[in-house]
Structure formats: structure tokens, C-alpha cells
Amino acid sequence: MSFDPVSFLEDAVQDDSTEDLGGTRELLLDALRESGHEPRVDAAGNVRASRGSGSPHLVFNTHIDTVAPHVPFERDGGTIRGRGACDAKGPLAALLSAFLDAEIEQGTLTLAVTPDEETLSTGAHALLTGEVAPGGPGETGATVTPLSASDPEPDAYVVGEPTGLDVCTAARGRFEGTIAVEGIAAHAASPESGVNAVSAAGRLLGALESFDNVDAHPQLGAATLVPTGIEGGESTNQVPARCAVTIDRRSVPPETAEGFRVALEAHLRSVLDGEDATVSLSLTERETPFLEAFATDTDEPIVDALADAARSASEAAGLGERGEVRPFGAATEASYFAPAPTVVFGPGRLADEEGAVAHAEREYVDAEAVRAAATAVREAAERLLADGQSGG
């Protein structure tokens, strides 16, 4: 008897996993154990299970945490509503179903589910490096076996997120930082005796629009840079000595977080060249690396296999045309697994024609889309493991 992903999802959505992940994790562990598997929870809080042996090696990954506040479960016909319905318990249900039901002719299939994608991604960081960073739900300072040390090393990854059953091969990264401008305080009646940090920051805001250190990406387009906050001045009758501007960078390959910081700081300093005000840029401190941009070649076997299966499963379920190969609309832990061939896939959408869905009070997913996603991932996995062509 095959696994029912919708029944699992209904139970999972009822659990509040905004802070305490225990309930959803136990549901996942129980489902694996009842199907004869021996899952384990590593020191970083990741749930891990494997089937088969040898090459090729395909990995399914998603997360069990959700953003606050919890939204109660509702079932309205074929629609499942509630926090996590699409981000990402719907994709989890589909990947779990495919993991349990796939017929493996050769190779290895691994399920690796992380605990804190919505915050610090310490689980995914541990899967990548073997190190458990502080700040997450795991045992800080402990070590785990990274996926790259598996025997064999993974050839490709499917990362569960709400993509509307499209196959997403790329996503922008997200960096956050603060531009600090230093001037000299003075009485506002004698502005020439000081250096106005707020005025200097105003000139730098204009310079953000001219910053261009990376070409537009063929899949993702141009990177974006947006000032999201400004703070400066201590008194209404004083020339301000300090001003801080927060910025949001949505990056495209091959830009890295440190490369962005160095390039933008140099650009801003050139704008103030010859002035007394000084400028520096610091990235927001994190216990784990930023989620950087990634892009998988659209000719990779994992892309073809999943896109074909998604189109077939969607048509059979009466869901219309799905399986488009396109970029994903948000930053994701998939970036940690690249440059291995990595795709993002799952039921549900980040937003629909009425507005936000994921992270919103109206979060929902269609039950038939969950079943179609499970079928698509299972068929793609069977094709890849049968052919021995997961990626590379």
C-alpha cells in the first residue's frame, strides 16, 4: 500500500512548528519507521534516512520549521489551509511519499530534512560542512557526517519549496548589511564647522543606483540593491556625526557575499573621495553563511527528468500545464548544495493572483497538487536511478 501524502500533510499542518519542532519531527520519524526504515536525527537536528547503495546518489531535502504565527489547519474541499501548508510541509509530504514509494533499481536515495531554514539554516550548514553552528536547535560545536562525505557523494538534489509544480533551477541570493557614515558633530548654526553624516549619506543613496559590479544572469536577470532603512542624528540642532543605512542585496551568480561587500564599499568611498566624511560597509553577522545565488544548468538530467514527470503528473491530475523550467522567487537552502546539480520543486505557490500565500495568513495548498508533486518526484527518481544519470 502506497503512502498517502495528503493524510500526512493534514497531521503536519496541525502541529505548531514555529518554535517547537518536536511534533512535526516525530510525525516524520514515525512515518519512516512504519515503512521499515531506520531514520536518525543528527546533532544539528536534521532527520536523515537512506535507501539503496552505490551510485548514483540522489538527495531529497526540505525543512520542517515554519514562520510565526501559527495558522490553524482547515480543510475546505480539496484545499488544505494553515501555516506550513505550502512552506514547506506540502513539499515535505510529497518528498516523503516519493522517498517511501520509489522503486530503486540501483543507486542511493537520501532524505535529509532540516530544522531551521526560516532562520539560520544551521541544519543545512551542517549537511554541507559537518559543523554545527551556534544559534540553531542542534548541539552547538558538535560534528555530523556531511552529505559530501557520503559513500557515494551526492550527484543531485531536489529541494522542496512551493514552486507551483514548476522546476526551478536558479535563485537569487540575499545579503544584508549596514552602510556606516562618519562625520563630525557641530552646532547647526555653524554647519561649516562640522561634517554632516546625513548629507553624505544622501549622496550615497543616489550612488546605490549606479552600483553595477556583476552582469545580468541569463536565468535570474539583474541583481538588485535596495536601501531598507536609515538612522542618523542625535539632536535637532546639531550637525549629525553618524548615519547608518541598511541595505538588501538580491545577488546573482557569480557574486559572493564578501565580493559584494568589498565592491560596494569601494564604490561608495569613491563617491565621497575628497570629502571629510568616511564610509564603511559591514554585512550583518550570521552564525552561518548567507544564502548565495545558485544556478543549475538546465540541461542536467535532474532537470529533464523532473520537468517531464511534473508535466505528466499535472496533466493526469487535471491541474493544467505545469513543469515549466524557471528560476525560484526567493532565497533558499538549495544554494548550500550547489554547485552540485540542484533543483527546487514542490506543490503550492509563494503568491497567487490574490497576493501572498507562503508566510501569509491565507497560506494553503491544493491536495491534488501535493499528490501530483509526490508522483512527479517519485517518477523522476525512478528514472534517474534506473538510468544512472542523476547529474554531473
Image (cartoon, rainbow, N blue to C red):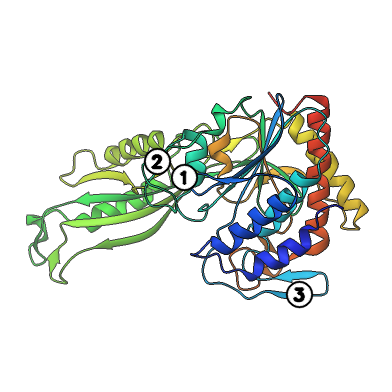
Q: Foreground mark, 1 or 3?
A: 1
Give left or right: position of 364 versus 18.
right
**Quadrant position of the C terminus in the picture:** top right
Callout 1: SS: loop
Q: Amino acid at mark 2?
A: Ala
Which residue type does callout 1 highlight?
A: Ala
* Residue at image coords 79%, 27%: 106
Given residues 327 and 115, the one toward you in this image is: 115
Circles 1 and 3, Cβ within 8 Å, touching? The answer is no
> What secondary structure is found at the residue carrying circle 3?
strand
Q: Residue 55 appears at what percent x and percent y?
A: 71, 24
Residue 340 in picture, x, y percent from top left: 61, 29
Question: Who's the residue at 65% across and 52% down the image?
Answer: 161
Give the residue at mark 3: 75
Q: Which residue is mark 2?
A: 142
Looking at marks 2 and 3 on the same chain, the residue that comes earlier in the sequence is marked by 3
Instruction: Work out whether residue 77 can be spotted.
Output: yes
Mark 2 neighbour class, 10 Å CA radius: few under 14, some 14 to 19, many 20 or more: some
Residues at marks 1 and 2 touching, judged by CB atoms closer than 8 Å: yes
Vertical comparison of 392 with 80: above or below: above
Q: CA distance from mark 1 to mark 2?
A: 6 Å
Q: Residue at x 37, y 46 (%)?
A: 140
Q: CA distance from mark 1 to mark 3?
A: 35 Å
Residue beneath disc 1:
43
